[in-house]
Image: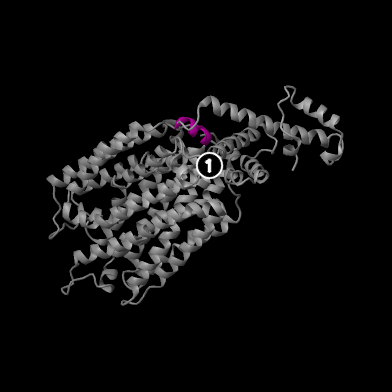
Amino acid sequence: MAIGGIFKNIRVYYLAFIAYWGIVLFGYDTGIAGGVVSQPYFKQEFGLLNPNGTANQKRTNEVSSNVVSVLQAGAFFGALASAPVSSKLGRKWTLFAFTLVFSIGAILATVAKDKRHGLQLIYAGRVISGFGIGGISAVAPAYVSECSPKDVRGRITGLFQIMVAIGVMLSYFINYGIGINIPTGPNVWRIPFGFQLVPAGIMLFGLLTVKESPRWLASVSRNDEALRNLAYLRSEPTDSESVVYEMAEIEAQIEEERAARRGLGMKEAFFGKGNFIRFVIAFVIFLLQQWGGQNSVGYYAPQIFSSIGYTGTKNSLLASGIYGVVKVVATAIFVFFFVETLGRRISLIVSSLGMGTLFFIIGAILKTHPVSVKNPPSSPPPASKAMAAMLYIYVCFYSMGWGPMPWIYVSDIFPTRTRHYGLAVASASQWLWNFVVSKVTPDMITDLGYKIFLMFATINVGAMGLFSFLIPETKGRSLEEMDVIFGAISAEERAAHIAAQERGTSQFFRFLQYWTTTETMPDPHAQSPSRHNAFLAQISPSGKTISMSKLLP
Protein backbone atom coordinates (compact mmCIF):
# COMPACT_ATOMS: atom_id res chain seq x y z
CA MET A 1 0.00 0.00 0.00
CA ALA A 2 1.74 3.18 -1.18
CA ILE A 3 2.00 5.98 1.40
CA GLY A 4 1.67 8.54 -1.38
CA GLY A 5 -1.64 7.01 -2.38
CA ILE A 6 -2.97 7.47 1.14
CA PHE A 7 -2.03 11.16 1.20
CA LYS A 8 -3.44 11.77 -2.26
CA ASN A 9 -6.74 10.22 -1.17
CA ILE A 10 -6.63 11.62 2.36
CA ARG A 11 -9.92 13.47 1.86
CA VAL A 12 -11.66 10.26 0.84
CA TYR A 13 -10.21 8.44 3.86
CA TYR A 14 -11.43 11.27 6.10
CA LEU A 15 -14.91 11.09 4.56
CA ALA A 16 -14.98 7.32 5.16
CA PHE A 17 -13.76 7.84 8.73
CA ILE A 18 -16.67 10.20 9.44
CA ALA A 19 -19.36 8.21 7.64
CA TYR A 20 -18.28 4.99 9.30
CA TRP A 21 -18.69 6.22 12.86
CA GLY A 22 -22.26 5.13 12.25
CA ILE A 23 -20.88 1.68 11.53
CA VAL A 24 -19.13 1.69 14.91
CA LEU A 25 -22.67 2.05 16.26
CA PHE A 26 -23.69 -0.90 14.07
CA GLY A 27 -21.00 -3.12 15.62
CA TYR A 28 -21.39 -1.76 19.14
CA ASP A 29 -25.16 -2.24 19.23
CA THR A 30 -24.94 -5.79 17.93
CA GLY A 31 -22.35 -6.77 20.53
CA ILE A 32 -23.60 -4.95 23.62
CA ALA A 33 -26.95 -6.64 24.27
CA GLY A 34 -25.75 -10.21 24.91
CA GLY A 35 -23.28 -8.99 27.53
CA VAL A 36 -25.81 -6.72 29.27
CA VAL A 37 -28.40 -9.49 29.59
CA SER A 38 -25.74 -11.93 30.88
CA GLN A 39 -24.94 -9.65 33.86
CA PRO A 40 -26.26 -11.16 37.15
CA TYR A 41 -27.74 -7.84 38.35
CA PHE A 42 -29.69 -7.38 35.10
CA LYS A 43 -31.16 -10.87 35.51
CA GLN A 44 -32.10 -10.12 39.10
CA GLU A 45 -33.60 -6.71 38.36
CA PHE A 46 -35.74 -7.82 35.44
CA GLY A 47 -37.04 -11.12 36.81
CA LEU A 48 -34.82 -13.57 34.94
CA LEU A 49 -34.08 -15.71 38.02
CA ASN A 50 -36.00 -18.58 39.60
CA PRO A 51 -37.22 -18.25 43.20
CA ASN A 52 -34.16 -20.24 44.36
CA GLY A 53 -31.79 -17.75 42.75
CA THR A 54 -30.78 -19.88 39.75
CA ALA A 55 -31.12 -18.55 36.21
CA ASN A 56 -34.46 -19.09 34.49
CA GLN A 57 -32.96 -20.23 31.19
CA LYS A 58 -36.19 -19.98 29.19
CA ARG A 59 -36.91 -16.43 30.40
CA THR A 60 -33.26 -15.40 29.97
CA ASN A 61 -33.23 -16.70 26.38
CA GLU A 62 -36.49 -14.87 25.67
CA VAL A 63 -35.34 -11.48 26.99
CA SER A 64 -31.86 -11.89 25.49
CA SER A 65 -33.23 -12.66 22.04
CA ASN A 66 -35.76 -9.81 22.31
CA VAL A 67 -33.19 -7.18 23.34
CA VAL A 68 -30.99 -8.21 20.40
CA SER A 69 -33.64 -8.92 17.77
CA VAL A 70 -35.82 -5.81 18.17
CA LEU A 71 -32.80 -3.81 17.00
CA GLN A 72 -32.72 -5.90 13.82
CA ALA A 73 -36.47 -5.48 13.33
CA GLY A 74 -36.13 -1.70 13.42
CA ALA A 75 -33.04 -1.84 11.22
CA PHE A 76 -34.91 -3.83 8.56
CA PHE A 77 -37.43 -1.03 8.09
CA GLY A 78 -34.76 1.65 8.36
CA ALA A 79 -32.80 0.03 5.55
CA LEU A 80 -35.89 -0.04 3.31
CA ALA A 81 -36.78 3.58 4.13
CA SER A 82 -33.26 4.73 3.31
CA ALA A 83 -33.69 4.29 -0.46
CA PRO A 84 -36.30 7.01 -1.16
CA VAL A 85 -34.80 9.30 1.50
CA SER A 86 -31.28 8.94 0.09
CA SER A 87 -32.54 9.50 -3.45
CA LYS A 88 -34.23 12.75 -2.40
CA LEU A 89 -31.87 14.24 0.20
CA GLY A 90 -28.53 12.86 -0.92
CA ARG A 91 -26.16 10.58 0.94
CA LYS A 92 -24.73 13.08 3.44
CA TRP A 93 -27.96 14.52 4.81
CA THR A 94 -29.67 11.14 4.87
CA LEU A 95 -26.89 9.88 7.16
CA PHE A 96 -27.36 12.96 9.33
CA ALA A 97 -31.11 12.34 9.67
CA PHE A 98 -30.77 8.65 10.52
CA THR A 99 -28.06 9.41 13.11
CA LEU A 100 -30.48 11.79 14.85
CA VAL A 101 -33.12 9.04 14.91
CA PHE A 102 -30.60 6.62 16.36
CA SER A 103 -29.68 9.06 19.13
CA ILE A 104 -33.31 9.31 20.26
CA GLY A 105 -33.48 5.54 20.66
CA ALA A 106 -30.17 5.45 22.54
CA ILE A 107 -31.47 8.00 25.03
CA LEU A 108 -34.63 5.96 25.68
CA ALA A 109 -32.66 2.77 26.39
CA THR A 110 -30.24 4.68 28.63
CA VAL A 111 -32.88 6.24 30.91
CA ALA A 112 -34.63 2.90 31.63
CA LYS A 113 -34.62 2.28 35.38
CA ASP A 114 -38.02 1.16 36.61
CA LYS A 115 -38.40 -2.61 37.02
CA ARG A 116 -41.98 -2.38 35.86
CA HIS A 117 -41.42 -0.38 32.67
CA GLY A 118 -37.65 -0.66 32.17
CA LEU A 119 -37.75 -3.51 29.65
CA GLN A 120 -40.41 -1.71 27.61
CA LEU A 121 -38.20 1.39 27.42
CA ILE A 122 -35.19 -0.70 26.44
CA TYR A 123 -37.21 -2.48 23.74
CA ALA A 124 -38.60 0.82 22.40
CA GLY A 125 -35.17 2.44 22.41
CA ARG A 126 -33.62 -0.52 20.62
CA VAL A 127 -36.32 -0.48 17.91
CA ILE A 128 -35.83 3.27 17.25
CA SER A 129 -32.04 2.94 17.35
CA GLY A 130 -32.36 -0.01 14.99
CA PHE A 131 -34.30 2.11 12.51
CA GLY A 132 -31.44 4.61 12.51
CA ILE A 133 -28.78 1.89 12.26
CA GLY A 134 -30.60 0.26 9.33
CA GLY A 135 -30.60 3.50 7.35
CA ILE A 136 -26.95 4.19 8.18
CA SER A 137 -25.86 0.68 7.20
CA ALA A 138 -27.55 1.04 3.80
CA VAL A 139 -26.39 4.56 2.92
CA ALA A 140 -22.85 4.75 4.36
CA PRO A 141 -21.32 2.08 2.06
CA ALA A 142 -22.92 3.68 -1.01
CA TYR A 143 -21.71 7.13 0.04
CA VAL A 144 -18.13 5.99 0.61
CA SER A 145 -18.06 3.82 -2.52
CA GLU A 146 -19.33 6.64 -4.73
CA CYS A 147 -16.63 9.00 -3.45
CA SER A 148 -13.71 6.55 -3.70
CA PRO A 149 -11.33 6.12 -6.68
CA LYS A 150 -11.45 2.62 -8.11
CA ASP A 151 -7.85 1.67 -7.31
CA VAL A 152 -8.46 1.95 -3.54
CA ARG A 153 -12.25 1.59 -3.45
CA GLY A 154 -12.13 -1.91 -1.99
CA ARG A 155 -9.76 -0.85 0.77
CA ILE A 156 -11.71 2.29 1.69
CA THR A 157 -15.09 0.55 1.49
CA GLY A 158 -13.61 -2.27 3.57
CA LEU A 159 -13.12 0.17 6.44
CA PHE A 160 -16.80 -0.59 7.03
CA GLN A 161 -15.95 -3.99 8.53
CA ILE A 162 -13.04 -2.58 10.55
CA MET A 163 -15.41 -0.10 12.18
CA VAL A 164 -17.95 -2.88 12.81
CA ALA A 165 -15.20 -4.92 14.50
CA ILE A 166 -14.09 -1.91 16.57
CA GLY A 167 -17.68 -1.36 17.70
CA VAL A 168 -18.07 -5.02 18.69
CA MET A 169 -14.74 -4.98 20.55
CA LEU A 170 -15.72 -1.83 22.47
CA SER A 171 -19.00 -3.44 23.50
CA TYR A 172 -17.23 -6.55 24.82
CA PHE A 173 -14.73 -4.61 26.94
CA ILE A 174 -17.32 -2.17 28.26
CA ASN A 175 -19.40 -5.14 29.37
CA TYR A 176 -16.28 -6.73 30.89
CA GLY A 177 -15.40 -3.53 32.77
CA ILE A 178 -18.97 -3.18 34.05
CA GLY A 179 -19.04 -6.82 35.15
CA ILE A 180 -15.81 -6.42 37.15
CA ASN A 181 -16.16 -2.90 38.57
CA ILE A 182 -19.90 -2.12 38.72
CA PRO A 183 -21.64 -5.43 39.40
CA THR A 184 -24.84 -3.86 40.78
CA GLY A 185 -27.09 -0.89 40.10
CA PRO A 186 -28.78 0.51 36.97
CA ASN A 187 -25.39 1.56 35.55
CA VAL A 188 -25.03 -2.10 34.54
CA TRP A 189 -27.13 -1.21 31.49
CA ARG A 190 -27.09 2.62 31.53
CA ILE A 191 -23.37 2.98 30.81
CA PRO A 192 -23.31 0.45 27.93
CA PHE A 193 -26.43 1.92 26.31
CA GLY A 194 -25.41 5.54 27.02
CA PHE A 195 -21.97 5.12 25.43
CA GLN A 196 -23.73 4.86 22.05
CA LEU A 197 -24.17 8.63 22.08
CA VAL A 198 -20.40 9.20 21.84
CA PRO A 199 -19.86 7.85 18.28
CA ALA A 200 -23.28 9.25 17.28
CA GLY A 201 -22.19 12.74 18.33
CA ILE A 202 -18.84 12.45 16.53
CA MET A 203 -20.65 11.43 13.36
CA LEU A 204 -23.24 14.22 13.54
CA PHE A 205 -20.62 16.96 13.84
CA GLY A 206 -18.25 15.27 11.39
CA LEU A 207 -20.89 15.09 8.65
CA LEU A 208 -21.00 18.89 8.65
CA THR A 209 -17.38 18.93 7.41
CA VAL A 210 -17.56 16.54 4.42
CA LYS A 211 -18.73 16.85 0.81
CA GLU A 212 -21.78 15.32 -0.86
CA SER A 213 -21.29 12.38 -3.25
CA PRO A 214 -20.31 13.57 -6.77
CA ARG A 215 -22.16 10.64 -8.33
CA TRP A 216 -25.38 11.49 -6.52
CA LEU A 217 -25.05 15.17 -7.48
CA ALA A 218 -24.57 14.19 -11.12
CA SER A 219 -27.61 11.89 -10.94
CA VAL A 220 -29.80 14.88 -9.96
CA SER A 221 -28.24 17.11 -12.66
CA ARG A 222 -26.08 19.21 -10.31
CA ASN A 223 -23.07 18.60 -12.54
CA ASP A 224 -21.05 21.73 -11.73
CA GLU A 225 -21.14 20.95 -8.01
CA ALA A 226 -20.42 17.29 -8.78
CA LEU A 227 -17.27 18.27 -10.73
CA ARG A 228 -16.04 20.53 -7.92
CA ASN A 229 -16.63 17.84 -5.28
CA LEU A 230 -14.94 15.18 -7.41
CA ALA A 231 -11.89 17.38 -7.95
CA TYR A 232 -11.78 18.17 -4.22
CA LEU A 233 -11.91 14.49 -3.26
CA ARG A 234 -9.19 13.60 -5.79
CA SER A 235 -7.00 16.57 -4.70
CA GLU A 236 -6.85 17.71 -8.33
CA PRO A 237 -7.92 20.86 -10.22
CA THR A 238 -11.29 20.71 -11.99
CA ASP A 239 -9.62 20.68 -15.42
CA SER A 240 -7.30 17.76 -14.56
CA GLU A 241 -7.33 15.10 -17.26
CA SER A 242 -8.09 12.31 -14.77
CA VAL A 243 -10.94 14.28 -13.16
CA VAL A 244 -12.41 15.23 -16.55
CA TYR A 245 -12.29 11.59 -17.66
CA GLU A 246 -13.86 10.28 -14.44
CA MET A 247 -16.58 12.93 -14.62
CA ALA A 248 -17.22 12.02 -18.24
CA GLU A 249 -17.48 8.35 -17.27
CA ILE A 250 -19.98 9.18 -14.53
CA GLU A 251 -22.08 11.38 -16.81
CA ALA A 252 -22.02 8.83 -19.64
CA GLN A 253 -23.24 6.09 -17.35
CA ILE A 254 -25.99 8.28 -15.91
CA GLU A 255 -27.13 9.38 -19.38
CA GLU A 256 -27.29 5.73 -20.48
CA GLU A 257 -29.50 4.91 -17.50
CA ARG A 258 -31.75 7.91 -18.07
CA ALA A 259 -32.18 7.04 -21.72
CA ALA A 260 -32.90 3.38 -21.00
CA ARG A 261 -35.30 4.09 -18.14
CA ARG A 262 -37.03 7.25 -19.33
CA GLY A 263 -40.70 6.97 -18.49
CA LEU A 264 -40.19 3.77 -16.48
CA GLY A 265 -40.36 3.29 -12.72
CA MET A 266 -39.32 0.88 -10.01
CA LYS A 267 -40.12 -2.16 -12.13
CA GLU A 268 -37.42 -1.23 -14.60
CA ALA A 269 -34.95 -0.37 -11.82
CA PHE A 270 -35.28 -3.88 -10.41
CA PHE A 271 -35.96 -5.88 -13.58
CA GLY A 272 -34.14 -3.87 -16.26
CA LYS A 273 -31.49 -5.54 -18.34
CA GLY A 274 -28.61 -6.70 -16.15
CA ASN A 275 -30.24 -5.50 -12.92
CA PHE A 276 -32.24 -8.40 -11.49
CA ILE A 277 -29.25 -10.71 -10.99
CA ARG A 278 -27.52 -7.96 -9.02
CA PHE A 279 -30.44 -7.69 -6.62
CA VAL A 280 -30.46 -11.49 -6.25
CA ILE A 281 -26.73 -11.46 -5.39
CA ALA A 282 -27.26 -8.61 -2.90
CA PHE A 283 -30.04 -10.54 -1.14
CA VAL A 284 -28.40 -13.98 -1.11
CA ILE A 285 -24.90 -12.85 -0.09
CA PHE A 286 -26.24 -11.46 3.18
CA LEU A 287 -28.57 -14.40 3.76
CA LEU A 288 -25.49 -16.64 3.68
CA GLN A 289 -23.37 -14.26 5.76
CA GLN A 290 -25.95 -14.22 8.56
CA TRP A 291 -26.36 -18.01 8.60
CA GLY A 292 -22.60 -18.57 8.51
CA GLY A 293 -22.34 -18.39 12.30
CA GLN A 294 -20.39 -15.19 12.92
CA ASN A 295 -23.31 -13.15 14.22
CA SER A 296 -24.43 -15.96 16.50
CA VAL A 297 -20.92 -15.91 17.99
CA GLY A 298 -20.73 -12.11 17.93
CA TYR A 299 -24.11 -11.34 19.51
CA TYR A 300 -23.95 -14.03 22.13
CA ALA A 301 -20.20 -14.34 22.65
CA PRO A 302 -20.45 -14.65 26.46
CA GLN A 303 -23.04 -17.42 26.09
CA ILE A 304 -21.02 -19.15 23.35
CA PHE A 305 -17.84 -19.12 25.41
CA SER A 306 -19.80 -20.37 28.42
CA SER A 307 -21.09 -23.26 26.30
CA ILE A 308 -17.53 -24.39 25.51
CA GLY A 309 -16.33 -24.22 29.10
CA TYR A 310 -15.57 -20.55 29.90
CA THR A 311 -18.02 -20.39 32.80
CA GLY A 312 -18.56 -17.42 35.08
CA THR A 313 -19.14 -13.81 34.07
CA LYS A 314 -15.46 -12.82 34.23
CA ASN A 315 -14.14 -15.73 32.15
CA SER A 316 -16.80 -15.53 29.44
CA LEU A 317 -16.62 -11.72 29.07
CA LEU A 318 -12.80 -11.70 29.00
CA ALA A 319 -12.73 -14.45 26.36
CA SER A 320 -15.27 -12.40 24.38
CA GLY A 321 -13.09 -9.29 24.65
CA ILE A 322 -10.05 -11.14 23.31
CA TYR A 323 -12.23 -12.41 20.45
CA GLY A 324 -13.11 -8.78 19.65
CA VAL A 325 -9.46 -7.71 19.60
CA VAL A 326 -8.49 -10.57 17.27
CA LYS A 327 -11.35 -9.60 14.96
CA VAL A 328 -10.26 -5.95 14.75
CA VAL A 329 -6.60 -6.79 14.06
CA ALA A 330 -7.39 -9.49 11.47
CA THR A 331 -9.89 -7.26 9.66
CA ALA A 332 -7.50 -4.29 9.55
CA ILE A 333 -4.60 -6.39 8.20
CA PHE A 334 -6.77 -7.84 5.45
CA VAL A 335 -8.46 -4.59 4.41
CA PHE A 336 -5.27 -2.52 4.25
CA PHE A 337 -2.89 -5.08 2.74
CA PHE A 338 -4.78 -7.85 0.93
CA VAL A 339 -8.26 -6.78 -0.21
CA GLU A 340 -7.02 -5.35 -3.54
CA THR A 341 -4.46 -8.15 -4.00
CA LEU A 342 -6.50 -11.31 -3.53
CA GLY A 343 -9.68 -10.10 -5.20
CA ARG A 344 -13.28 -10.59 -4.13
CA ARG A 345 -13.94 -14.20 -5.20
CA ILE A 346 -10.72 -15.77 -3.92
CA SER A 347 -11.15 -14.05 -0.55
CA LEU A 348 -14.70 -15.36 -0.19
CA ILE A 349 -13.74 -18.90 -1.25
CA VAL A 350 -10.77 -19.19 1.14
CA SER A 351 -12.78 -17.58 3.93
CA SER A 352 -15.76 -19.94 3.64
CA LEU A 353 -13.61 -23.08 3.50
CA GLY A 354 -11.48 -21.96 6.45
CA MET A 355 -14.49 -21.06 8.61
CA GLY A 356 -16.27 -24.32 7.80
CA THR A 357 -13.23 -26.42 8.65
CA LEU A 358 -12.78 -24.73 12.04
CA PHE A 359 -16.46 -25.09 12.93
CA PHE A 360 -16.23 -28.81 12.14
CA ILE A 361 -13.22 -29.07 14.49
CA ILE A 362 -15.01 -27.18 17.31
CA GLY A 363 -18.11 -29.35 16.94
CA ALA A 364 -16.02 -32.52 17.05
CA ILE A 365 -14.10 -31.42 20.17
CA LEU A 366 -17.31 -30.40 21.96
CA LYS A 367 -18.86 -33.76 21.07
CA THR A 368 -15.92 -35.77 22.43
CA HIS A 369 -15.20 -33.43 25.39
CA PRO A 370 -18.62 -32.19 26.56
CA VAL A 371 -18.77 -29.31 29.06
CA SER A 372 -20.26 -30.01 32.49
CA VAL A 373 -23.01 -27.46 33.14
CA LYS A 374 -23.96 -28.62 36.65
CA ASN A 375 -20.38 -28.83 38.00
CA PRO A 376 -18.26 -26.47 35.90
CA PRO A 377 -14.50 -26.41 36.58
CA SER A 378 -12.97 -23.35 38.25
CA SER A 379 -10.77 -22.71 35.20
CA PRO A 380 -11.34 -23.68 31.55
CA PRO A 381 -10.03 -27.21 30.77
CA PRO A 382 -7.59 -27.84 27.88
CA ALA A 383 -10.40 -28.84 25.51
CA SER A 384 -12.18 -25.54 26.16
CA LYS A 385 -8.97 -23.60 25.53
CA ALA A 386 -8.52 -25.48 22.24
CA MET A 387 -12.07 -24.60 21.16
CA ALA A 388 -11.51 -20.95 22.09
CA ALA A 389 -8.32 -20.96 20.02
CA MET A 390 -10.30 -22.39 17.08
CA LEU A 391 -12.83 -19.55 17.46
CA TYR A 392 -10.02 -16.99 17.40
CA ILE A 393 -8.58 -18.54 14.22
CA TYR A 394 -12.10 -18.78 12.79
CA VAL A 395 -12.66 -15.03 13.17
CA CYS A 396 -9.41 -14.43 11.24
CA PHE A 397 -10.84 -16.36 8.27
CA TYR A 398 -14.13 -14.48 8.65
CA SER A 399 -12.30 -11.15 8.66
CA MET A 400 -10.45 -11.93 5.42
CA GLY A 401 -13.59 -12.65 3.40
CA TRP A 402 -17.16 -13.01 4.57
CA GLY A 403 -16.84 -10.14 7.05
CA PRO A 404 -15.86 -7.19 4.83
CA MET A 405 -16.43 -8.67 1.35
CA PRO A 406 -20.25 -8.74 1.13
CA TRP A 407 -20.41 -4.98 1.76
CA ILE A 408 -17.53 -4.29 -0.64
CA TYR A 409 -19.01 -6.53 -3.33
CA VAL A 410 -22.54 -5.15 -3.11
CA SER A 411 -21.20 -1.57 -3.14
CA ASP A 412 -19.28 -2.49 -6.31
CA ILE A 413 -21.98 -3.96 -8.51
CA PHE A 414 -24.82 -1.41 -8.75
CA PRO A 415 -25.00 1.57 -11.14
CA THR A 416 -25.56 5.06 -9.72
CA ARG A 417 -29.30 5.21 -10.46
CA THR A 418 -30.07 1.96 -8.64
CA ARG A 419 -27.24 1.86 -6.10
CA HIS A 420 -29.36 3.24 -3.26
CA TYR A 421 -32.03 0.63 -4.01
CA GLY A 422 -29.41 -2.11 -4.27
CA LEU A 423 -27.78 -1.17 -0.97
CA ALA A 424 -31.23 -0.89 0.64
CA VAL A 425 -32.14 -4.42 -0.49
CA ALA A 426 -28.75 -5.73 0.67
CA SER A 427 -29.03 -4.03 4.03
CA ALA A 428 -32.66 -5.14 4.46
CA SER A 429 -31.61 -8.73 3.70
CA GLN A 430 -28.79 -8.44 6.19
CA TRP A 431 -31.10 -7.15 8.91
CA LEU A 432 -33.95 -9.56 8.10
CA TRP A 433 -31.76 -12.65 8.47
CA ASN A 434 -29.89 -10.94 11.28
CA PHE A 435 -33.22 -10.71 13.11
CA VAL A 436 -34.07 -14.36 12.46
CA VAL A 437 -30.64 -15.64 13.53
CA SER A 438 -30.47 -13.45 16.63
CA LYS A 439 -33.97 -14.53 17.67
CA VAL A 440 -33.30 -18.28 17.45
CA THR A 441 -29.64 -18.43 18.54
CA PRO A 442 -30.15 -18.54 22.35
CA ASP A 443 -32.49 -21.51 22.01
CA MET A 444 -30.17 -23.19 19.48
CA ILE A 445 -27.23 -22.87 21.89
CA THR A 446 -29.35 -24.48 24.63
CA ASP A 447 -31.00 -27.17 22.50
CA LEU A 448 -28.37 -28.14 19.90
CA GLY A 449 -25.13 -28.02 21.85
CA TYR A 450 -22.24 -29.14 19.65
CA LYS A 451 -24.58 -29.59 16.65
CA ILE A 452 -24.89 -25.82 16.21
CA PHE A 453 -21.22 -25.70 15.15
CA LEU A 454 -21.70 -28.59 12.71
CA MET A 455 -24.70 -26.79 11.21
CA PHE A 456 -22.71 -23.60 10.67
CA ALA A 457 -19.79 -25.62 9.23
CA THR A 458 -22.06 -27.23 6.63
CA ILE A 459 -23.47 -23.85 5.58
CA ASN A 460 -19.97 -22.37 5.28
CA VAL A 461 -18.58 -25.11 3.06
CA GLY A 462 -21.67 -26.23 1.15
CA ALA A 463 -23.53 -22.98 0.48
CA MET A 464 -21.10 -20.08 0.96
CA GLY A 465 -18.23 -21.84 -0.80
CA LEU A 466 -20.36 -22.67 -3.85
CA PHE A 467 -21.82 -19.17 -4.03
CA SER A 468 -18.30 -17.70 -3.99
CA PHE A 469 -17.34 -19.80 -7.04
CA LEU A 470 -20.32 -18.58 -9.06
CA ILE A 471 -20.18 -14.78 -8.73
CA PRO A 472 -18.04 -12.63 -11.11
CA GLU A 473 -14.84 -10.89 -9.99
CA THR A 474 -15.05 -7.08 -9.61
CA LYS A 475 -11.57 -6.20 -8.33
CA GLY A 476 -9.99 -3.21 -10.08
CA ARG A 477 -13.10 -2.44 -12.15
CA SER A 478 -14.78 0.95 -12.02
CA LEU A 479 -18.37 1.27 -10.84
CA GLU A 480 -19.36 2.21 -14.38
CA GLU A 481 -17.84 -1.02 -15.78
CA MET A 482 -20.27 -3.13 -13.74
CA ASP A 483 -22.98 -2.66 -16.38
CA VAL A 484 -20.65 -4.39 -18.86
CA ILE A 485 -19.87 -7.24 -16.43
CA PHE A 486 -23.56 -7.92 -15.79
CA GLY A 487 -24.65 -7.55 -19.42
CA ALA A 488 -26.63 -4.30 -19.22
CA ILE A 489 -24.53 -2.85 -22.06
CA SER A 490 -21.74 -4.08 -24.31
CA ALA A 491 -18.14 -2.98 -23.85
CA GLU A 492 -18.17 -1.34 -27.29
CA GLU A 493 -21.27 0.72 -26.54
CA ARG A 494 -19.86 1.90 -23.20
CA ALA A 495 -16.54 2.94 -24.80
CA ALA A 496 -18.38 4.97 -27.44
CA HIS A 497 -20.52 6.73 -24.83
CA ILE A 498 -17.48 7.61 -22.69
CA ALA A 499 -15.61 8.99 -25.70
CA ALA A 500 -18.56 11.19 -26.67
CA GLN A 501 -19.01 12.49 -23.14
CA GLU A 502 -15.28 13.15 -22.70
CA ARG A 503 -15.21 15.04 -26.02
CA GLY A 504 -18.08 17.22 -24.87
CA THR A 505 -16.42 17.96 -21.51
CA SER A 506 -13.13 18.81 -23.22
CA GLN A 507 -14.96 21.20 -25.56
CA PHE A 508 -16.45 22.96 -22.56
CA PHE A 509 -13.04 23.62 -20.99
CA ARG A 510 -11.50 24.68 -24.30
CA PHE A 511 -14.41 27.07 -24.76
CA LEU A 512 -13.79 28.60 -21.32
CA GLN A 513 -10.08 28.89 -22.09
CA TYR A 514 -10.82 30.50 -25.46
CA TRP A 515 -12.93 33.28 -24.01
CA THR A 516 -10.87 33.92 -20.88
CA THR A 517 -7.68 34.36 -22.93
CA THR A 518 -9.29 36.82 -25.35
CA GLU A 519 -11.86 38.90 -23.49
CA THR A 520 -14.61 38.80 -20.90
CA MET A 521 -17.16 36.09 -21.67
CA PRO A 522 -19.93 37.69 -23.75
CA ASP A 523 -23.50 36.80 -24.45
CA PRO A 524 -23.18 34.07 -27.10
CA HIS A 525 -26.28 35.25 -28.90
CA ALA A 526 -24.77 38.69 -29.38
CA GLN A 527 -21.64 37.46 -31.14
CA SER A 528 -21.26 36.94 -34.84
CA PRO A 529 -22.05 33.42 -36.14
CA SER A 530 -18.82 33.39 -38.13
CA ARG A 531 -16.73 33.81 -35.00
CA HIS A 532 -18.61 31.03 -33.25
CA ASN A 533 -18.28 28.76 -36.28
CA ALA A 534 -14.55 29.38 -36.45
CA PHE A 535 -14.20 28.49 -32.76
CA LEU A 536 -16.29 25.35 -33.10
CA ALA A 537 -14.30 24.25 -36.13
CA GLN A 538 -11.11 24.77 -34.12
CA ILE A 539 -12.19 22.56 -31.20
CA SER A 540 -13.87 19.90 -33.33
CA PRO A 541 -12.47 19.68 -36.86
CA SER A 542 -14.64 16.63 -37.61
CA GLY A 543 -17.73 18.79 -37.34
CA LYS A 544 -19.21 16.69 -34.49
CA THR A 545 -19.67 19.36 -31.85
CA ILE A 546 -21.99 20.07 -29.04
CA SER A 547 -24.19 23.14 -29.32
CA MET A 548 -23.19 26.52 -27.91
CA SER A 549 -26.23 26.47 -25.62
CA LYS A 550 -24.88 23.29 -24.01
CA LEU A 551 -21.42 24.78 -23.62
CA LEU A 552 -22.66 27.77 -21.70
CA PRO A 553 -24.65 27.89 -18.46
What element does badge 1 sit on? helix
Do we see residue 261 in this rendering?
Answer: yes
User: Badge 1: few (under 14), some or many (20 or more) residues near its Cα, within 10 Å?
Assistant: many
- Front residue of 103/420: it is 420
Residue plotted at (58% across, 44% down): 219
- Residue at the far front: name it: 263
Q: Residue furthest top?
A: 542
Along the line of sight, the residue nearer the viewer: 435 or 255: 255
Q: Is residue 172 visible?
A: no
Question: Is 34 displayed left or right of 8 in the figure?
Answer: left
Residue 426 location (% of width, % of height): 40, 46
242 with respect to 129 (left or right) = right
Q: Which residue is mark 1?
A: 416
Residues 60 and 277: in front is 277
The answer to which quarter of the image holds residue 50 is bottom left
Q: Quadrant of the C terminus?
A: top right
Residue 205 counted in the magenta span: no
- Taking the spot 74% from the left edge, 37% from the top edge, the residue there is 551
Q: Is residue 442 above or below residue 265?
A: below
Residue at screen point 32% across, 49% down: 323
Return the x and y of residue 162 as percentages of the image width and height: 43, 47
- Across and down, in percent, residue 397 comes to 33, 39
**Which span is picked out in magenta?**
476-486
* 194 lies left or right of 441: right
**In magenta stretch: residue 485:** yes
Residue 168 vs 507, above or below: the answer is: below
Marks counted in the figure total 1
Instruction: Report the colour scheme.
Output: one colour
Label the magenta part by its dominant secondary structure. Answer: helix
**In this rendering, would 313 be left or right of 95?**
left
Image coords of residue 89 (percent x, y): 56, 54
Inspect the image, locate mark 1, and give the three-letter code of the amino acid beneath it. Thr
